[in-house]
Image (cartoon, grey):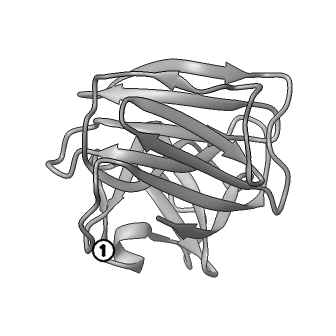
Amino acid sequence: PQRRSANAMDLHDYNNSWIPNVEQQDIQVEGGVAYPNCLIDTGYHWHDSTFDADQFSQITVSTSAADLFIGPAVRIDPNGVATYYGYYASSTARYLIKSVDGVISTLRSTVVSGVANGDVIRLEAVGNRLTPFLNGTKDTVVGSIIDNDIAAGHAGLAALGEGSGTSLSNWEA
């Protein structure tokens, strides 16, 4: 992928606690804001913490555009394989996805509405239930789902797209 600008850097270079799960695909940071810069789905996990199997990941949307997706991810395999659950969004859509060894499946989605600047999106994994939240409320449009494929891992981020339209400014887990 191309750099957004001379000032942009890979998320791992910005803070080496962020580890990409697919090499040569990245999330870039510029001015403290993270942007997707990946032609395939990618996940980054937070390496410096231990996470219980029941976990959450949450982001605040800085900017939102069509066809560029970024969002929280849970149960990311820390061993360099693209295995995780993600809930990512653009200005036009929201997706609950699963990646197992790099094979992406859409579990739930809506192409009726996306996210706006300032929205908070969250993904919780409790037992085998995945629940997306939008601005503190369960996202009933996308809906919860039961899935048994990924039992544990790290919290982090998921992204798809290359550009500067959709970005995040805060992450917590």
In which quarter of the view is residue 62 placed?
Answer: bottom right
Q: Is residue 52 above or below residue 89?
A: below
The image quarter containing residue 161 is: top right
Residue 41 in view (yes/no): no
Image height of 143 relative to 58, above or below: above
Q: Residue at x 14, y 48 (%)?
A: 79
Which residue appears farthest toward the left when viewing the image?
79
Residue marked by disc 1 = 17
Q: For this view, does 34 lie left or right of residue 137? A: left
Counting from the top left corner in percent of width and height, residue 104 is at 41, 22
**Residue found at x 28% / y 31%:** 150
Q: Is residue 22 visible?
A: yes
The residue carrying pointer 1 sits among few (fewer than 14), some (14 to 19) or many (20 or more) residues within 10 Å by Cα, namely some
Residue 122 position, x and y percent, is: 61, 51
**Looking at this view, is 114 or 123 the one in front?**
123
Q: Residue at x 48, y 58 (%)?
A: 27
Q: Quick check: 92 above or below 56?
A: above
Toward the viewer: 26 or 45?
45
Q: Residue at the spot x=85%, y=23% of the render?
A: 112
